Structure formats: structure tokens, C-alpha cells
Image: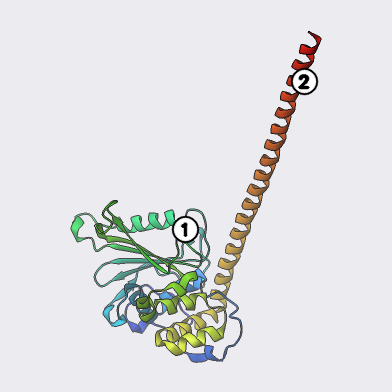
Amino acid sequence: MQDNYELKTIKGYRNSMPYNDGWKVKTGALGFKMCNDYLFRAFLQCDEESLRALIAALMRTDPGEIEDVIVTNPIVLGETILSKEIRLDIHVVLKSGKHLDMEMQSYSHKGWMERSLFYACRCYDSLDHGDLYHEHPGVWQIEFCNFRPFADYQGFYFNFYMREEDCHEHIFSDKFKISIVDMTSVDMAKAIDVEQGLAKWARLFRATTWEELKMLAQEDKSIDKALSTAWQLTEDERIRDQMQRREDSERYWNALLKDVSDTKQALEASNRALSEKTAALENAEREIVRLKAELAARKA
């Protein structure tokens, strides 16, 4: 078992973890989430072959077309994540110079879209002094969502550019792109995304049993290799601890969201009841005024 995960750059297959099929004897529930953002970050950092395959699927091309990838923000796996490092994205630079930033969104929260836009813009703002604007290689922000990102529209793979309002075919620039993979809607994947393997990657991240993973591995050698790496990483107690911390944080966050939602609903119910009582009181006051006026008229 590889013991030192500190990697400065991931460049070439020599930095990929060796294949190990020990995971194939596993059965039943996984005991962890494949969509755990720490695991997502860890295995892509440690396995360039899987990273190439995933990027190729996103680009709808063959992995052989991805000549070189470099992870520019490696972390020391197993070490405690500080608050300033809480965003577990993986930043990759292709040989062309184009910047890719991938992130696993395990749960929905208010502002995640704006945060994605913020990080994409910050990534784009990477020119050094003296660089020419037209030489900027471009930025591609990619979000894997384990929830439906749009309440009023459903699909599997979305690609967004800045377009002209009336003529949607006219793109302002193809150097700024944000993509979203809705893993909950994998059944709606286009034929090309099934063929290029992106649908399989989404099923991998959504899997909950070893049997599901074995079926995927039988269909795709890249998935088989990725699972070897993921399994080896989850066998490391330090990494399992960090994964658990992330899931505990997710549960805590979801509990807070539920508390806020419950409190909001209770407040809305209280406000409705108060409005009804206020309306009833106003009606009663109007009735009293009417009766007094009627009584005064009779006396007159």
C-alpha cells in the first residue's frame, strides 16, 4: 500500500497508483459515498489515467487526445483540511494551457451557482504582467451535482457560454465555459455522452454497492482502474477519517438547513394565523361600528 500521498504535480503515468483488484472481492453496501468530495479530489489527484478518462468524457473525445494534464493544487492526503482549504476542487491545466476546475457538489445549498461563477472568474483572472489578453487559453468550470441543479429544467449534461440575448447562436467567447453534470438525471444522457463514458462516470459517483461498481468495471477499463485507486485510498485510515469528516460536515449542514426551513415554515404558519386573527378582529370591529350606528339610528 502506497504510504506517501504528497504529490507536487501529477504528470505522466508514473504518478498513477498501481492497479490492485483487491476491491473485486467486496460485496454489499460500500460503507462510503463515491460522491464524497474528498474521495473525488483524492483519487483524481492520485490517478492520472482516470483523470484523463474523465476529462476526455467531458470533452466528448478519446482519452488519447488528452496529451498532458497537470494538477496545480495538490493536497497532502490524510492531513486535516483547514477551513481555508474547505473547497475540494481539483484544478487541472491541459497541454494547450487551458484551465479546468472540477468540483463535486454533494448537496445543494444557496449560492452554490454564484460560488461556481466566482471561482471560474477568479481562475480566468490569471494573466501575469506582460501577458496579452488574446493569448489567454481559457477557463472551464465543471460541477458534478448529486442533485437537480434546476427546478424547472431537467437534463444530464449542461454547457453554458456567454451568448447574445436575442441570437443565442452567437457566443461572446468560447474561452469562458461552465458545465454542469446532473448525476441524478443520468438516464437522460445523450447518446454521445453514453458512448464517450460520461454516463458511466456519473453512475460510478452515484453507486451505493460493490455490485454496481463491478458491473461498471466490466464495461469500461477506465472505470476498473479508477475503482482500484478509489478502493486503495479508502483502505487508508487517515483518508477514511477525512472522508468521514466531510460527511459529518454535510450532515451537520443539512441539519442546519432543515432547522432553518422548519423555523421558516413555523414562522410563516404563525404569521398566517396572526393575519387570520387580525382579519377576524377587524371584521368584528367593523360589525361593532355597524351595530352602534344602527342602534343610534333607531334611537333617533
- Looking at this view, is 282 or 110 the one in front? 282
- Looking at this view, is 237 or 296 the one in front? 296
Q: Going 49% across and 64% down the picture, which residue do you hit? A: 148
User: Above or below — where is 300 with respect to 37?
Assistant: above
- Looking at this view, is 179 or 36 the one in front? 179
Q: Cα distance, mark 1 to mark 2?
A: 52 Å
- SS at badge 2: helix
The residue indicated by pointer 2 is 291
From the viewer's perspective, tell me whether residue 240 is left or right of residue 140: right
- Spot the residue most to the right: 299
Identify the amino acid type marked 1: Asp
Q: Going 47% across and 83% down the picture, which residue do you hit? A: 227
Check disc 1: other Cα within 10 Å, few if <14, some if 14-19, many if 20+: few
Q: Earlier in the sequence, mark 1 or mark 2?
A: 1
From the viewer's perspective, tell me whether residue 174 is left or right of residue 206: left
Image mark for residue 152? 1
Where does the image place residue 260, in percent across and percent down from the top left?
A: 62, 51
Is residue 77 visible in this depiction of the protein? no
Q: Going 67% across and 36% down the picture, which residue do you hit? A: 275
- SS at badge 1: loop
Where does the image place residue 218, in percent across and percent down from the top left?
A: 46, 90
Where does the image place residue 177, in percent across and percent down from the top left?
A: 32, 61
Identify the amino acid type marked 2: Leu
The quarter holding residue 279 reads top right
From the viewer's perspective, tell me whether residue 168 is left or right of residue 254: left
Where does the image place residue 172, in percent across and percent down from the top left?
A: 24, 55
